[in-house]
Amino acid sequence: MPLSAVQNTFTGNPLDRVSDRRGDAAWIAERLADPGSSAVALWRGAPLVTDAEGAPRLSRLPLALAVDAAVRPAEDLLFLGMGRGSAVFALDLQGEVDPTAGLLHGRGRFQDLRSLATVLSAEEAAVAATAKHVFEWQNRHRFCSACGHRSDPADAGWKRICPSCRAEHFPRTDPVVIMLPVHGDRCLLGRNAAWPPNRFSALAGFLEPGESLEEACARELKEEAGLETLSVAYHSSQPWPYPSSLMVGLIAEVSSEQATPDQTELAEVRWLGRDEARAVLAGGHEIHTPPPLAIAHQLLRTWAA
Ligand SMILES: [Zn+2]
C-alpha cells in the first residue's frame, strides 16, 4: 500500500531524524550551541503548548532556556531531528512542581497528550508522541538490565550504555496486534470486561516472542473469542506511546460467527453489518467505539466503507 494510505494519529512526524548523526558528539554539540535550535518540552509526559489562532501548538523553547531548565542536560535533552534547517530537541521534566510556575513561566501550559492528540496538527502530535515514547523508555530503563549498574545516555538520548559491562540498550517498542474479525458481510466488536456496557472495540493483544503478527492475531482471536482465523490482512500501524507500543492493525477473516467470549478479558461480542458499523461510527447507535484517534476506529471505518 502507499506510504500515506492511512494516516493514523501519532504518525507523520515531519522531522528528519538524521539518525546517522546522533552518535557524532561534536555535531550534536554544534546543534546544541546553534541559536537557531529549539526544544519542545514535556513534563511527566505532558507536552508544553500555547494557543495560536484558537488552537494549541507545541511551544518552541530557545535551546539555551531548555538547557537551563534541564535537571541533567545530558540525560534530559533528546535530539529529535532537523526541521526547516534547524535542530529540534525535546526536554524531559519530571519534578513535582509545574515548571510553568518557575523557569518556564509565560511559555504556555502542560496538557495531557491524549487530550491534545486530535487538536494539535498531525505533525506536532507525532513529534510529541516520539518524545514521550523515548522519555518513557529513558525513565524506566536507567539501570542496565544485564548487570544492574546505572547506565549512561548516549546518541543524543537514543541509546544507553552500561559503563560497567558495556552493554548497549535501545528504546523498546512493544508490538500489539489489534484486529477486526470479519465473516461474510459482518464484523465483530468486543467489550472488554472492564469497560462500560455500551463500549465496544476491535480485539487486541501483545505479540509474544516467537510469534508472527498473523500467529498472534490467530491466537488472540482463539483465546478471547473462540474464533478460528482463516486469513489476515494488514491495515496500518500506529505508534502508541503509553508507554511504548506499536499498534498493528489487521483485518482477520474468521471461519464462522460462533464466537465465545472468554469472560475474563472479553465479556461480550457483537456482530455488525456494514450499515450498523457506519451508524456506530457516526455516533447513531446504542454501542460506542473508540474515537478517530484510535486505530480501532480506522479499522472499522475501512471495513464499513
Ligand atoms: Zn551492565
Image (cartoon, rainbow, N blue to C red):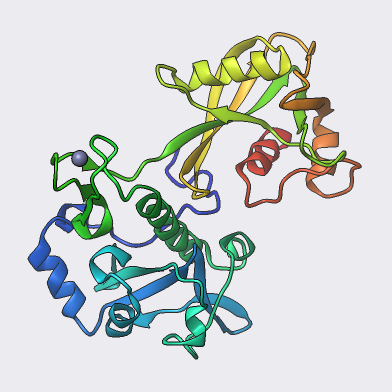
Q: Quadrant of residue 54?
A: bottom right
Looking at the image, the residue that sits furthest to the front is 148
Looking at the image, the residue that sits furthest to the right is 286
Looking at the image, the residue that sits furthest to the bottom is 106
Residue 188 in view here: no
Q: Is residue 46 left or right of residue 295?
A: left
Judged from the image, the quadrant occupied by ligand 1 is top left
x then y, percent, for residue 86: 25, 74
x then y, percent, for residue 66: 33, 79
Q: From the image, which quarter does the C terminus lie in?
A: top right
Q: Quadrant of residue 149?
A: top left
Q: Is residue 70 left or right of residue 274?
A: left
x then y, percent, for residue 145: 29, 37
- Residue at 58 percent of width and 71 percent of height: 111
Front residue of 204 and 251? 204
Q: Is residue 41 left or right of residue 231?
A: left
- Residue at 29 percent of width and 73 percent of height: 84
Rendered view: 52 above or below 88: below
- Residue at 69 percent of width and 33 percent of height: 202
Rendered view: 272 above or below 9: above
Looking at the image, the residue that sits furthest to the left is 26
x then y, percent, for residue 48: 49, 75
Q: Is residue 106 left or right of residue 93?
A: right
